Amino acid sequence: MTVRQIEGGHGTVVDVLRAAAQVNGDVEAYVEPATPERPREALTFAGWDRAADGVAGLLAASGVGRGDVVCLVLPSSIAYAVCYAAALRLGAITSGINVRLGAAEARSIVERTRPAVTVFDDGLDVPGGPVGTVLRRSDVTASYGGPPPASLPELDPTDPVAVVWTSGTTGLPKGAVFDHTRLAAVAAGTDVLSAPGDRRLSPLPFAHVGFMTRPWDEIAHGVTTVLTPTPWRAADALAILEAERITVAQGVPTQWALMLAHPDLERTDTSSLRVAGTGASRVPPELVAAIRERLGVPVIVRYTSTEASLGTGTVPGDPDEVVATTVGRPVPGVELSLRDDDGRPVGAGEVGRVHLRSAAVMRGYWGGPPTGPGDGGLVLDRTATSAVLAADGWLTTGDFGRLDGAGNLCLVGRANELYIRGGYNVYPAEVEPVVTTHPAIAEAAVVGVPDPVLGEIGVAFVVLAGGGDGGGSPAGDAGRLLAEVRAAVGETLADYKAPDRLVVVDALPLTSMMKVDKRALADRWQAEAGERPTGAAGPTGPMGPTGGTGGTGEQVTEAETARSRA
């Protein structure tokens, strides 16, 4: 089937979907693959447009109008996409609430958005709080063929359309607000990840910025979004790659490693693939090479933040080492600047805070229910917004990085993960890939914890290769393993960046956005402080003249292991 790209001349996402329903009406917009519990389900662009009209009628009858908020407490699904499109044509603002969020996080979102309607998945409990009119997923699906609203409002490209919530790893989530113009800018900067007729498999939850700001791009390119069943399994992902003729497959490094190691790969037809995407954490060079060689497609990495929506990326043809150690160069339409604490650009090769500027950057942080419809009624949290978004459009991210000789961005850590050991800044993202070069370690996360001597020290939480517990293996002696890790780090990085403690865990905890939950690891260290032997809380030894330990830090020799209680 020939898929046509929808060209310019449209002011809103609603306009683009109406056009797609005409020229790509028979193209599948969404597919929910078959599982043992249910058959395959698909929705074409024409069907999506029609279903959105019916659900818009239901929402309008439930009191939703221009400028109102609709909260979606739904898993990634066709129903989620239909609700989003329905709210768009009413001029309403969609706030997705990840079903994995904790009760306090979810409650804080509904309290701040005061939705007119909240759509819950069937079977989910309705929490306390101002959730507005409650609709169920089954109510939504039953209205796909229902009557559309009697009238629809005149929309403006600057109307807010979505609130995307940050992961909340350092407090309650903040809501980044986007309008139609921002979604159009995202479509213009997606580059190699979108081509007319792509069939894309992505594990991202629909409440994530990777979905909420992409509808214009996916509609305009006639992209079919194939949903990844949950819980994720390598065998399922491989079966879907073949059955759905996937052209763009995305996953975090761990998922790719599991797929490559699965015996089904040898008999899976992956010839439809044209690109493999990854991100969220560093990917070892050998994994990049394995993906490229075994699947026969280029591997690319993308980087952004919730607030920026667009950022940087590698491109097909970049060497494996570039894909593994950098996040590439700014994508079309994005400007990048690295700055020090005073806002001055840093020199070549120096570490600075990452700043991004583009037409896709958020309007600002959500400040409360709108005071009226459209752009004029939008309420932003001016204090929180001005702390990260300057009047000239530059966004201060939470990440630190430096540029290599080719202008590729090398991330070294996040502001909320940075710890100061004896007066020296340590970025865990620099240390973790060196820790995982040890053959006994499969995964690692480094966090800073309080120390009475050095202020803070680094603790490496590690998952052993092969699922071992350390007994009877080269990694069994925790002190020896720590010494070997410290030696490896010292060969590559400054000695003060080597972790001071080592904790073996069965698995690293993840946030609702599938990132390592470092706050949970730090909390665990503090909670178990009383169980550790006297003197194990931190290193001892003479302090060097700059506030760090003297010499090579060899006086730090204590180590301990603990099994995960998760």
Image (tube, rainbow, N blue to C red):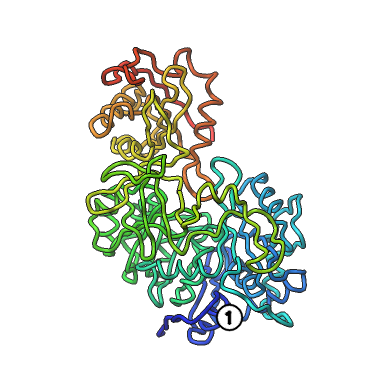
Classify the position of the N terminus by image quarter: bottom left
Q: Please name whichever residue, 456 or 547, is drawn nearer the observer in this view of the structure.
A: 547
Where residue 146 sits: x, y (%)? 71, 80
Classify the position of the C terminus by image quarter: top right
Q: Is residue 543 above or below residue 490?
A: above
Q: Is residue 107 left or right of residue 545?
A: right
Residue type marked 1: Gly
Q: Is residue 550 above or below residue 251?
A: above
Q: Helix, strand, or loop for circle 1? A: helix
Q: Which residue is mark 1?
A: 47
Q: Residues within 10 Å of mark 1 (few under 14, many from 20)?
A: many
Where residue 525 sits: x, y (%)? 50, 27
Residue 151 lies in quadrant: bottom right
Q: What residue is drawn where x is 52% and y is 36%?
A: 519
Where residue 340 sits: x, y (%)? 38, 41
Q: Is residue 464 above or below residue 357?
A: above
Q: Is residue 155 left or right of residue 416?
A: right
Q: Is residue 67 left or right of residue 503?
A: right
Q: Is residue 434 left or right of residue 172?
A: left
Where residue 82 sits: x, y (%)? 61, 71
